[in-house]
Amino acid sequence: MDLFITGAGWITPLGESLGTVWDAILAGTPAPARELPGPPGGKPHFAATIPPSLVDSVARNPRLRRSSNISLFAASAALSALRAAGLDPAKPGKLALISAVCDGGVIYTRKFYDQIVRQGSGSPLLFPETVYNAPASHVAALLGLDGITYTLVGDASAALAATAVGIDLLTSRQADHCLILAAQETDWILCEAYCHWRLSTPGQSISIGSNRGALIADGAAAIVLSREKSPCRLHAVTDGVPFFRQSEASASLAAALRTLPASVPSRVIASANGSFTDHAERTATENAYGPLPTVFPKISLGDAFGAGALMQIICAMESLRRDPSGTILVPVIGLNHQAAAALVSPI
Amino acid sequence: MQPNQPAVAIVAAGIISPLGRGLEATARSLRDGVDCVTPVTAFDVASARCHTAAHVPGTWIDDLRDTRKRRRLHPASLMMIAAMRELRAQDPGFAPQHFIIGATGGGMTFGEAFYRSLAKPADRRRAGWLANYNPQKPLLDAQEDAGFRIPGAIIANACASGANAIGHAFELIRSGRHDAILCGGYDCISELVFRGFDSLQASTPEKIRPFDAARTGLVLGEGAALVALENAARARARGAQILGCVTGYGISTDTHHITQPHPSGIGPRLAIERALGSANCPAESIDYINAHGTATTFNDATEGLAISQLFGNRVPVSSTKSMMGHALGGAGAIEAVFSLIAIREGFIPPNINFMNCDPAWDLSIVANQSRPATLRRVLTNSFGFGGANAALVIESAAGAN
């Protein structure tokens, strides 16, 4: 069954406009890094954050008044995607919501646990926002959905797993449209954890191939998948192929690529983020297809882990909007679970 | 079920919970109505409202700490490995194409230790390992132990996660997209989540008494459960034993509030109605309801109302959380396996600590003692934060025909 991306929306450290942010990516504009307050006595961390003013309007919604940044980002991207798809957020029809997160509401989680450590108890206002499905719950409430809502958690590959679930639901006609949503918020504790894994950079920018680590970023992305024709076709999404250690990541991506339709893509929107994934991804894609023109969006967007893969798909859409020729490969190597890939093509 | 859709068989299962490690031990405890709730000693609960939980004793998974690597694994990983090994031993020929798990917290206690370690420079060396708290880690550890390398997905729909994982796997097989899927759920007690429920005053300082007029809240539990789902025709063709089957799945989203269900019970009712519709069976054909039954004011009020409206007082109801507490993301999978055990062993597990039914509804609670029964079809409910609701219909092996 042919499935199409009928709408997309994102919110990134560079803004919300699909076209403007895509231009910045093509120009190689670096992500705007900001210093985050670190643990007492600890080293500072840098992350690409979203200015609060960008989510002012959604933050005024009563349901989102107390929510964490991740839910505000998710709601903003979701509403943009629905509008772009021509769906009325007040009457979205038989819409399933599949959300992907990597670290969830980490700011409130850290604050809540900090209260426990310091005071022996935490605020009941914070705890509900720590659950992984809080963003999906809020977005479902904004849209009045009473049907299928799933939240998938994992590394960056979870967003492609969520897309695959959307494909399953559309193919089996359990839904007429699927809103695939992924969001990420930054916090110093996240930077600290990924630094311990040597996956995030202590610096303010990333260098592809350097293996110094990613610049962690705020962000959310959403796409609407549908059986209705649109100029952008989601040609294929592979299953995730797990890897138990980083040295296996390239082989996992290669295995995923072997399950794609046997045609050579015209270009690549890479998941490379300055970590071990860069070499693994380049090796797998070059072995499969030879050298291809490649765009590295995370130089400009930072790495919003949970949302990164959907941002790649939106980049592919924007690329096709400018040049509707060929098929675009979206490879994704997560940091600690799976590799997967998608193909996006013009109709 | 449509005439051309394949039946979905359960060909193997594995479980570890406070009620036991393995199906046999679990069946004994369920039948005996064992109360597994004990004082919490893993962290300081002196200032908390609730002081108890139902733990999986560490000694039950000690045998799995037999290599340097496994000694360092989080208990969540070890519980998943325990459940996986039991399942694999039952059906070594089961070859899953997918692995779908429900979980909410991952190795949260590692996350907590990571946070605390940041304040102590001496502990910082360990911090890199402690950062391995992601929910995908136990999934990977269990796969590696079993020698699988298959696509995985972790559904984190709060306390409905485990049921969602089984339900989604069921749909994937029934729609013909896959033939065999390994699915289930796990969760481990952590201080953060314990304190979270305490902060909401959802956990109780007393006994957990689901559906009782005097109920005062939940206690937390933990565990892992896995089921091997397979296209029944394919399972029969390879000579696999069919333990039971999944015949229905319903999911709904209640947007009323992030932690409280709509008082009308519409969320649970929709999930149950959709599960019955999916199984193409009338409410009268359900022989037992394994309720979500957390013993919180709001859950039991809405679930009790939904069950009353749809089933009257004809169907026996119990909440096994009365014995082992609430295993959150693992609960749906654990209770699906309990339902399978009840069908195979011919008894209804009890709702212990029960005194008087809440007069707001008229339910046939299986109070305090298990009851022998021939069960053909069981409904098991799971509801969670964020308005995530799921219900599964589990049937005897005859349902696979």
Image (cartoon, rainbow, N blue to C red):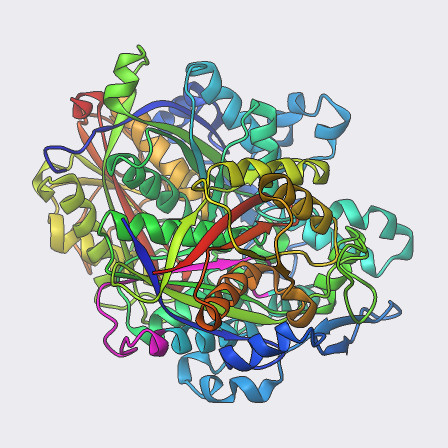
Residue A216 location, quadrant? bottom right
Is A326 contained in the magenta span?
no
What span is in magenta? A82-105
Q: Residue B89: where, in percent of width, then height?
A: 48, 15
B289 horizontally vs A212: left or right = left
> Which corner quadrant holds the C terminus of chain A?
bottom left
Q: Nearer the viewer, residue A84 or A128?
A: A84
At 32% across and 47% down in the image, what residue appears? A168
At 39% across and 77% down in the image, what residue appears? A79
Q: Nearer the viewer, residue B40 or B277?
A: B277
At 78% across and 69% down in the image, what residue appears? A205
At 25% across and 68% down in the image, what residue appears? B263
Q: Is residue A267 above or below residue A43?
A: above
Q: Is residue A325 above or below residue A9?
A: above
Residue B168 location, quadrant? top left
Q: Residue B388: where, in percent of width, then height?
A: 35, 58
Residue A42 location, quadrant? bottom right
B140 horizontally vs A208: left or right = left
Q: Nearer the viewer, residue A153 or A167?
A: A167
Is A104 contained in the magenta span?
yes
Q: Is residue A284 above or below residue A322?
A: above
